[in-house]
Amino acid sequence: MPQIILTPAQRKVHRADAHHLDPVVLVGGDGLTAAVIKEVDSALKAHGLIKVRVFSDDRGAREAMLQTLSEQLSAAPIQHIGKLLVLWRPLPEKAKPVDEERMPGPRDVKVLKFSKRGGQRPEVKLVRVLGNQRLTPGGQVKRAKVLKKSIKKSAL
């Protein structure tokens, strides 16, 4: 899988976003193992932008790890500073489950209020109507169900 190529401006934006992040994956003395690559892949799927800390003193080995990770996981190498590697891959689209029994939510309705004088334009109001409400012919929002009053409270 090829690595993602970014422009310097895009890389700069991702570098700024990664500034406050903590390393998610730590690479020990064994280097890049299959388990480490799998963990980096799952972190990229979950977060998109990650930091990886490498406990190796060899700068060339760290750069090789950055290139290997970006090529194998089809990610973009963002930054290599010290022992930290920053990788980015766009998050996959999550499929939203469709619930057939779900009722519609709030809706916005335009209400026209005509003036008593005939020559003026009608006043347009945008009203949000919730699921338990209805709109009267006069343009007012009313509850759909009338709440029953307590007999004890009405006796007082």
Image: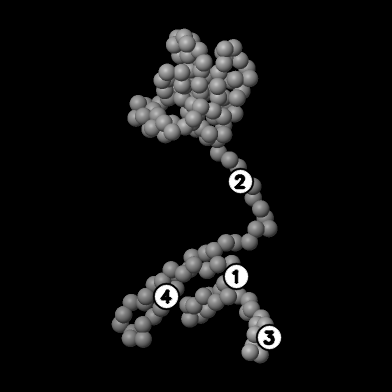
Q: Is residue 10 visible?
A: no
Q: Which residue is mark 4?
A: 112
Residue type at the position of mark 1: Asn
Label 2 neighbour load within 10 Å: few <14, some 14-19, many 20+: few
Residue 96 is marked as 2
Q: Along the horizontal axis of the image, is 126 left or right of 147?
A: left
Name the residue: 64% across, 50% down: 98
Q: Which residue is mark 3?
A: 152
Residue 156 in the image, given as x and y percentages of width and height? 63, 89
Mark 2 and mark 4: Cα distance apart in space: 36 Å
Residue type at the position of mark 3: Lys
Quarter-of-image position of residue 6: top left
At numbered mark 3, what does the secondary structure look like: helix, strand or loop?
Answer: helix
Q: Along the horizontal axis of the image, is 76 left or right of 155?
A: left
Q: Along the horizontal axis of the image, is 6 left or right of 119?
A: right
Q: Earlier in the sequence, mark 1 or mark 4?
A: 4
At numbered mark 2, what does the secondary structure look like: helix, strand or loop?
Answer: loop
Name the residue: 42% across, 75% down: 112
At numbered mark 1, what does the secondary structure look like: helix, strand or loop?
Answer: loop
Q: Which residue is mark 1?
A: 132
Residue depth check, mark 1 versus mark 4: number of the one nearer the observer: 1
Residue depth check, mark 4 versus mark 3: number of the one nearer the observer: 3
Mark 3 and mark 1: Cα distance apart in space: 26 Å
Do labels 1 and 4 touch, CB within 8 Å? no
Mark 4 and mark 3: Cα distance apart in space: 41 Å
Residue 33 in the image, given as x and y percentages of width and height? 61, 15
User: Is residue 113 shown above or below 22?
Assistant: below
Of residues 90 and 155, the one drawn nearer to the viewer in this rendering: 155
